[in-house]
Image (spheres, grey):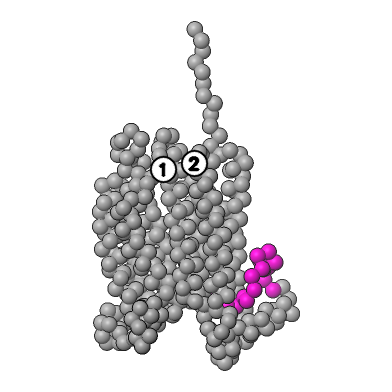
Amino acid sequence: MNAPILKSPTKTRPLALATWLWIVAALVLAMVVVGGVTRLTESGLSITEWKPVTGALPPLSEADWQAEFALYKQSPQFRYETGPAGMDLAAFKFIFFWEWFHRLLGRLVGLAFALPLAWFWARGAIPKGYKPRLVALLALGAMQGAFGWFMVRSGLSGQMTSVSHFWLSIHLMTALFTLGGLVWTALDLRRLALIGRARPARWSWAASLAGGVLAIQLLLGAWVAGLDAGLASDTWPLMQGRLVPEYDDTRGLWYAMTHDPFLIHFEHRWWAFVTVAALIWFARKVRHLDRKASVAIHIAFGVQILLGIATVVAGMPIWLAALHQLTGALLVMAFAWGAHVYGRRRDQTGSIATQ
């Protein structure tokens, strides 16, 4: 009798890949928070040049600091805002730190993704079908860096004293989309490790609907940050003692809806509850598949609403506003989890997948 033929063990390591992606997701989460602090401290224009390699080091001598400060003095922000307010070198060093730290963290995220990806690739550890997705995530990271520079450049010309809120929203939304992609791919790989025949989860129409509503809210939040629109009111639920605040519509309603800080604050404030309704609807669909994912979505948007109100009423303290942005990123992660659960409803055998 012939001996049975044994299959050689596969070299792929889906669980190790999933763990790596979770680590990268944590770094992206930290970068979102640091980016929020950078915006809140108006530090984004303190470094006026993009030096991918040499820029990793901060100024190391007094002469270097004076040279960086001289470059910053040429910016509209210094000429029209911080300069007349009396900014000195010590104050410049403070805002420089946050922008430098934000860029340094971006470099670290890139290395934390690219180097392990190359190692896993060389070892043949990436399962079939996942290489294009991982390369796409790497490309998103590269785009994130490019969008960040376009954002900074938008505030270095003309008479603008801050970056374009449109470029800021593109920069932030790309980061959050990347974060969701990391979570989704990590969950796919984890299931592949636990259930060898598990297919990748599929995006669903329900996730598109709820995710679209959430994306609008995140976009409005980015515009609020870019225009300092959080300072438009320190009361809730009314603004200026009325439900709908006064705003400048001399250039048309659409322009006001996308440029006026008071109206954008109003939009972000009340679209939040449309978002809550959409997320409750979606979480109920997820609940019978994975109660933990449903609970995570509920907790995330509940805390986010409370933090948003507290941030406004407290007058936009940096720590509360940063916590609000952190929870927004956690909400994206929770939603990606729920969308993945809903998209993996049936495995290859047609049975409900609960792993």
Residue 129 badge? 2
Q: Please identify the dominant SS of the magenta region.
A: loop
**Residue that label 1 marks:** 200
Q: Is residue 71 left or right of residue 194?
A: right
Question: What's the residue type where badge 1 is placed?
Answer: Pro
Task: Give the answer, above or below, for where 250 lies relative to 105.
Answer: below
Which numbered disc, 2 or 1, marks the residue that appears first in the sequence?
Answer: 2
Is 282 displayed left or right of 316 in the figure?
Answer: left
Residue 287 locus on image (x, y percent): 27, 50
Image-based side of 287 in relation to 250, left or right: left
Q: Is residue 133 left or right of residue 213?
A: right
Query: Looking at the image, do the residues carrying marks 2 and 1 touch, with CB atoms under 8 Å apart?
Result: yes
214 shown above or below 81: above
- In the image, the segment drawn in magenta is 43-59
**Quadrant in the picture for residue 101:** bottom right
Q: Residue at x 57, y 53 (%)?
A: 113
Q: x and y percent of residue 175 in the render?
A: 48, 62
In the rendering, at what x and y percent does residue 333 appear?
41, 57
Residue 54 is inside the magenta segment: yes
Q: Position of residue 181 (x, y in %)?
A: 45, 53
Q: Amino acid at mark 2?
A: Gly
Question: Is 206 in front, or is 101?
Answer: 206
Mark 2 nearby-residue class (10 Å; few <14, some 14–19, many ≥20) = few
The residue under the point 29% across, 79% down is 236
Residue 58 is drawn in which quadrant?
bottom right
Q: Quadrant of the C terminus?
A: top left
For the question of whether residue 77 can be seen, the reply is: no
> 353 or 137: which is nearer to us?
137
State the residue in front, 314 or 154: 154
Q: Residue at x 58, y 43 (%)?
A: 120
Q: Which mark is residue 286?
A: none
Reply yes or no: does residue 82 show up in magenta.
Answer: no
